[in-house]
Image: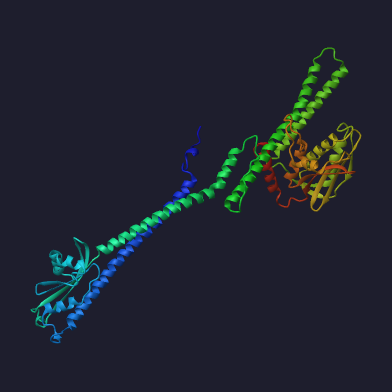
Amino acid sequence: MTDSRENQGSTVSARLRIVGWIVLTTALALLAVTVSMRSIMSGQVAEAANVGIAQEIEEFRTFAAEGLDPKTARPFSSMDELMERYLARQQPMAGEAIIGQADGRVLAAGTAANQAGSWLAEDPALLGRILNDAKTSGIQESNHGTVRWAKAEAKDASGANGEGHQAHLVVAHFIGGAQEEVNRQATMLFGVAAGGLALTAGIAWLAAGQILRPIRTMSETAASISAKDLSARVLVEGRDDLAQLASTLNAMLDRVEASHLAQRHFISEAREHLGSPQRQLASALQKLNEEDLPRKQRNAIISTAHDHISQMGQTLADLDLLAQSSTPNFIQRQMISVGEVTADVAAAASRPGAYPDRRFRIAESAKAQAWLDPLRVAQAMHQLIQNAVAHTEDGQSIRIGSAAVDGMASFWVANDGPALDPEEARALLENYRSAPGTGEQGSGMGLGLAVVKAVAEAHGGTAWVESGQGNGTSFGFSLPLADAGNGSSCEEDFAQSMASSLGGES
């Protein structure tokens, strides 16, 4: 059944999404800048036209009020003469028209030099609308574009009561040419913005690829991992967030590989510890079916069968203990005497029939109280005793001891067998043996030592081995004397690690 989550999310690559958002954001910003600049420049055109018009109107009013006829040195008696004199002094700017009307005549300043003047002078309909408008300024549309205008009136002395001659001055500015220049500059700015946007898209594409390269590497690394090869790791470069992600992924892969190797190891250990006794037990039972088997031989076969059954039972008990180590209540702490636990373990090992061919003695006994689980400690010590028995000859002595130093309670079992190489000794508690039948050679932690390590780490302690010339080999574990309020945390951490190793559920 297809997971519905597979149909969720975007089908577009992260690289394209990053580039798309950058380009979209940049495009909106550039568009806003272009539109704003065009609006500002258009406003400046209108403002410049208004300022020029207002200045011309003010100059005309001043001239009409204060100007003198050079022939008489008195105020102008003819509005036609006044308008001619004033217009002769004006030089309209580009797009500006200065038109005077007096006694029915229409006069334009700078007509030959400025085409705008002729546009207005030769358009009686537009000029009429402006002169007949009740307002003194405004905006009109013409054949030559938008016109911004203002007008002023002058009267001669005889018109003081409203009956004399009048003259009108119209100052108009055709802003179409200036607006076309604004549009041209806005178009140029838009083209530059488009080129910049394309450059931004290219840079964003390269930058996104560079940034996402570690993620692609992680994806390729994850894809290369299989059940047979978990060794691939991501190359960590730099100290940024992606480098931290790569380190976290590598740490996760380390844990996965360790858990996978541990799971294979424990499966192979169970196969080895159960397979051989099972075959021997089947052979023994087959012999019991033979006729005329002497009673003494039959009893020996039955005894051997019981031994094999006991051996398989011990293996199942060890596996069950390892499975229990992944549960929160694996450790049940109580205040116990370290020395009494040591004595009980030695007594159990020395009881008749337990290990008849070995001699046990207590080499050292700690006089201290500790907050520990006596059952789990005894189980771990039993594993160490079995390990020592397996590596000694009949009649050899095995030493059992405990000590309390620096807040730690140490339990150990020692024998006088041959010394171990330091690397071999370290591997006994850190590495996992190769699965039998794979053709690989190696040594490492067996099922019994795995139980010891599980008990030690569940208490928040460690398992260890010491070996040297003349001192034999000592296997042991050190546990905190007091819980110190962090026992549950240690148990939870250990439970999680063992749960992943054994593939069980906590």
* Percent position of residue 234, x then y: 62, 45
The location of residue 70, given as percent across then percent down, is 15, 85
Q: Nearer the viewer, residue 360 or 133?
A: 133
The percent position of residue 325, horizontal first and vertical second, equals: 71, 40
- Left or right: 399 in relation to 162: right
* Visible residue check, residue 328: no
Q: In this view, does 107 lie above or below 448?
A: below
453 or 250, which is in the foreground?
250
Judged from this view, the residue extending furthest toward the top is: 292
Q: Which residue corresponds to the image point at 49% horizontal and 47% vertical from the top-left?
A: 15
Outermost residue to the right: 395
Residue 501 in the figure: left or right of residue 93: right
Query: In the image, what residue occupies the spot 76% across and 51% down?
Result: 482
The quadrant holding residue 275 is: top right
Up the image or down, 67 lies above or below 218; here it is below
- Image quarter of the C terminus: top right
* In-image side of 43 versus 235 (left or right): left
Residue 386 placement, left or right of 199? right
Nearest the eye: 431 or 287: 431
Which colour style is shown?
rainbow
Residue drawn 56% across the image and 46% down it? 215
